[in-house]
Image (cartoon, helix red, strand yellow):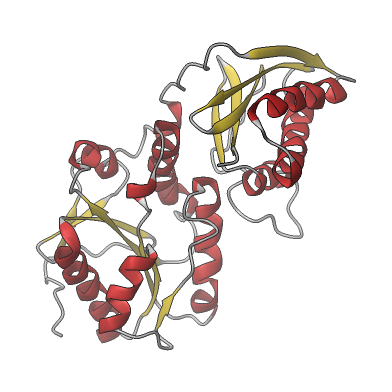
């Protein structure tokens, strides 16, 4: 296969983040195989993280080898808050070898169930630019099937500094380096919802309020225990960093139970909790744990409005 890389491809140092809009299976294969072949021609490694049906298409053309690695995304594909940490792990080995690295990452957009999850995936795409801005140099291609999803292509473009068209990489004129999606307003809580004002000494009351909501919606066992642990961490942070108190709301929504925590604190770092804490790291461990325990975590924080954190847990069935 000949390389599709054009001489007009811009030379960009550091992390490169490229959107690849395509329509249907044939265009997916054509564009991603061209990207992989470019890497092999340049003696670069490639990490491929795409849905399983897409993996089979690419494996049929380019089997796994030392330079091409297909990773299992089962545990993280539907959890936007875990994806940056996953990419850091997936490319770490090649970066340590000093070898140039490319990645192909496609989220399972056809399986997205609600607006909250879609918005967090968009925000993840935007955060990738910040997460790797000062890290190792590597190049990530993000395929996006416009079939049935063309209406949100503009939102995807806002997250990517570059775009691939006709086998060529060009600057993305719609890229927005300043406005993260996480500051889009949250949806309104489902009505009815339960509310509790909590302060120091009220963590038991927080857990009891959550347990009563979980009982109504059929949530129990390990999922409830994980939610209790995550909720306790968030409530304790409210008390410690959010002015000594917070407000808990609980409700059921679209096959999920949601726990919302509001306080007067401000989280400055939008990446907090999204990378695995190092042994020497101070702070950030609690929210990393919360992302591992919950099916979706939404965080909104400004100096004027304080912080809102929503924990989503999928309900049985």
State the image quarter where residue 294 is shown: top right
Q: Where does the image place residue 8, in percent across and percent down from the top left?
A: 11, 66
* 317 in relation to 138, above or below: above
Residue located at (48% from left, 56% from top): 134
> Dividing the picture into quarters, in which one does residue 89 lie?
bottom right
Q: Residue furthest left?
A: 166
Q: Relative to 49, is 212 on the left or the right?
A: right
Q: Residue at x 27, y 74 (%)?
A: 57
Indicate left or right for 49 with 157 as reference.
Answer: right
Q: Quadrant of residue 49?
A: bottom left
Q: Residue at x 81, y 24 (%)?
A: 208
Residue 9 in view (yes/no): no
Please name whichever residue, 288 or 194, is drawn nearer the observer in this view of the structure: 194
Q: Which residue ends up furthest to the right in the rendered image?
A: 201
Whole-percent x, y for residue 45 in the image = 39, 80
Locate residue 229, reporting x and y percent.
77, 39
Residue at image coords 40%, 88%: 65
246, 10: nearer the viewer? 246
- Total numbered labels: 0
- How far from the left and from the top, in percent, is residue 3? 16, 79
Horizontal relation, residue 88 to residue 12: left or right: right
The quadrant of the image that shows the C terminus is top right
Question: As displayed, is residue 130 above or below residue 280?
Answer: above
Can the viewer see residue 299?
A: yes
Q: Nearer the viewer, residue 258 or 199?
A: 258
Please identify the quadrant where the N terminus is shown. bottom left
Residue nearest the observer in this picture, 133 or 206? 206
């Amino acid at each position: 296969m000949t390389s599709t890389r054009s001489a007009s491809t811009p030379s960009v140092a550091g992390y490169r983040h490229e959107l690849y809009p395509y329509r249907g299976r044939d265009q997916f294969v054509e564009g991603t195989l061209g990207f992989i072949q470019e890497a092999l021609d340049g003696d670069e490694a490639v990490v491929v993280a795409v849905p399983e049906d897409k993996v089979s298409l690419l494996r049929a053309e380019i089997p796994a080898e030392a330079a091409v690695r297909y990773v299992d995304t089962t545990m993280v594909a539907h959890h936007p808050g875990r994806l940056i940490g996953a990419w850091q792990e997936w490319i770490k080995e090649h970066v340590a070898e000093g070898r140039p690295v490319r990645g192909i990452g496609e989220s399972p957009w056809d399986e997205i169930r609600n607006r909250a999850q879609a918005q967090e995936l968009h925000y993840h795409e935007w955060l990738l630019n910040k997460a790797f801005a000062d890290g190792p140099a590597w190049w990530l291609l993000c395929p996006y099937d416009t079939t049935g999803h063309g209406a949100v292509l503009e939102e995807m473009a806002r997250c990517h500094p570059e775009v691939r068209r006709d086998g060529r990489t060009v600057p993305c004129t719609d890229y927005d380096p300043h406005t993260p999606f996480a500051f889009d307003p949250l949806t309104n809580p489902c009505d009815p919802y339960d509310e509790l004002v909590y302060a120091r000494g009220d963590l038991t009351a927080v857990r009891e309020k959550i347990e009563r909501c979980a009982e109504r919606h059929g949530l129990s066992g390990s999922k409830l225990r994980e939610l209790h642990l995550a909720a306790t961490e968030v409530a304790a942070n409210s008390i410690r960093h959010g002015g000594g108190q917070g407000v808990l709301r609980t409700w059921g929504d679209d096959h999920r139970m949601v726990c919302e925590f509001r306080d007067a604190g401000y989280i400055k770092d939008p990446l907090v909790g999204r990378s695995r804490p190092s042994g020497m790291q101070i702070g950030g461990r609690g929210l990393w744990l919360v992302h591992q325990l919950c099916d979706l975590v939404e965080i909104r924080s400004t100096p004027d409005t304080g912080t809102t954190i929503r924990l989503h847990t999928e309900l049985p069935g």
